Amino acid sequence: MQTSELEMNGTKYILRVLVHRRRNSTVNIRDNVITIRLSSFASKKEREDHLSEFLDWAKKKIMAEPERFRPPKMREYRNNDVIEICNEKYALRIDYAKRKSASAKAIGNIIRIILPEDASGHEKKRMTSNLLAKVISKKRLPVLHNRIKLLNNMFFQKEIKEIRFRNMSSRWGSCTKDGKISISSRLLLAPDSILDYVCVHELAHLVHFNHSKEFWELVGRVIPDYKERDMWLSENGEKCVF
Ligand SMILES: [Zn+2]
């Protein structure tokens, strides 16, 4: 994989180019990261053409909607920081090693993160934030399971296939028609009442797969003050970042 930086209108974007063993080449943009995957079956010339074509597409897309593709806001973590999440305190140990990828392990309430020493400052921040979200989501998953199952038994009685935390930055929750519920790990940094609201919102989608009047009536029957909680998210959600 090749990583480089490009600047547009004073904002830095990260361009990642990799070759994958697929027939087609793809491009996607998430936050300020443009990822281009080129087919290993394509000729060198074809790959070069795809690369420049995709890069043009990405640039146009970013120019058209700069708000959508901003660098994610991230916290700054230092070795020995203590972070408090859901009333639990975690001590952070950050080490560096000569390697390509980062890893994290939680031992009790100590979270040990190992970062590649050669990564850029921005990359180190991004890796730390992703790993923290992952490690703490894993610890809190049983609690989320119990909460959603309880709410489902009490109010919805729908079949649930899967419950998971996902490191999503653009949405608080999502669900599929067949009962797979994803909750943004960023909600671990919000009060329980807000997490409950998002769980109920997704469960209500298993009854109404839309945002119709009936859908909101159902949400309102379970959480009468849902509007305030929704408002809390639009006003304070930005601060919920790992
Ligand atoms: Zn919804």
Image: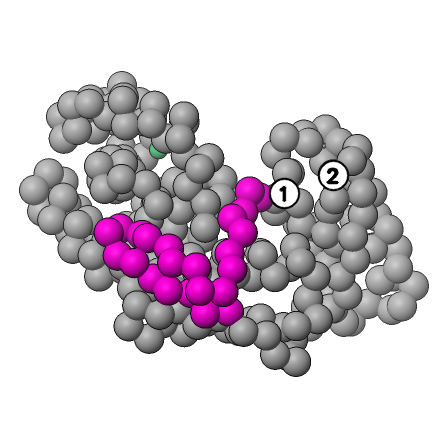
On residue 208, which mark appears? none
- Residue at the disc numbered 2: 11
Q: Position of residue 204 (x, y in %)?
A: 23, 36
Seen in the image, is 239 located left or right of residue 122? Answer: left
Please tell me how crowded label 1 is: few (under 14), some (14-19), or many (20+) other residues with Cα within 10 Å: some
Instruction: Please report the bounds of the magenta region as a residue range.
Output: 72-94
Closer to the camera, 14 or 161?
14
On residue 71, which mark appears? 1
Q: How many marks?
A: 2
Residue at the extreme front of the image, as rendered: 80
Residue at the extreme bottom of the image, as rendered: 98
Q: How is the image coloured?
A: one colour
Mark 2 lies on a secondary structure that is strand
Q: Is residue 5 above or below residue 192?
A: below
User: What amino acid is at disc 1?
Assistant: Pro
The earlier-in-sequence mark between 2 and 1 is: 2
User: What amino acid is at disc 2?
Assistant: Thr
Residue at the extreme top of the image, as rendered: 213
Q: Quadrant of the N terminus?
A: bottom right
Please tell me how crowded label 2 is: few (under 14), some (14-19), or many (20+) other residues with Cα within 10 Å: few
Tell me if residue 165 can be seen: no
Closer to the camera, 56 or 114?
114
Would you say residue 81 sits in the magenta stretch?
yes
